[in-house]
Image: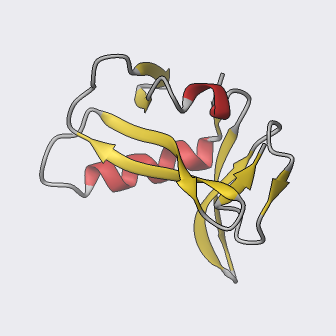
Amino acid sequence: MITMTDSAISAVRRFMDSTETPMVGLRIKVEGGGCSGFQYGMKLEQDVEQGDELLDFSGLKVIVDENSWPLLDGVTVDFVDGLEGSGFKFENPNASNSCGCGKSFSC
């Protein structure tokens, strides 16, 4: 199960409200690459694809593909807004190593 903090949900809703095209929700995925082997990806989606898992967070739809699901199980997604900048932060209990930027990890 993925957890989204209230701050992350609010940030995604702000992004969705600013788009001209209606979006179904936010896709969170894991791809090969980054400093540590895997990297997180996020984007607003217009459609859900075959095999996608659809999660609901207070009306916000989060879409996860079947290949990313095992690597995201237990992840908490937060949105941090501070002096050093703002952005999404992933806390992944499955990661054995992560890079300093927090956007890539290894298992």
Residue 74's place in the image compared with 36, above or below, is: above
Residue that extends furthest to the right in the rendered view of this protein: 96
Colour style of the rendered protein structure: secondary structure
Residue 33's place in the image compared with 46, above or below, is: below
Residue 106 lies, in percent from the top left, at 75, 50
Residue that extends furthest to the bottom in the rendered view of this protein: 83
- Residue under the image location 48 percent in, 41 percent down: 28
- Residue under the image location 68 percent in, 68 percent down: 35
Figure quadrant of the N terminus: top right
Number of callouts in the render? 0
Taking depth in this image into account, of 18 and 103 the one nearest to the observer is: 103
- Residue under the image location 38 percent in, 54 percent down: 14
Residue 41's place in the image compared with 54, above or below, is: below
Figure quadrant of the C terminus: top right
Residue 72 lies, in percent from the top left, at 64, 33
Residue 49 in which image quadrant: top left
Residue 77 lies, in percent from the top left, at 64, 44
Taking depth in this image into account, of 31 and 82 the one nearest to the observer is: 31
Question: Position of 41 compared to 81: left or right?
Answer: left
- Residue under the image location 41 percent in, 39 percent down: 27
Question: Position of 89 compared to 31: left or right?
Answer: right
Residue 84 in which image quadrant: bottom right
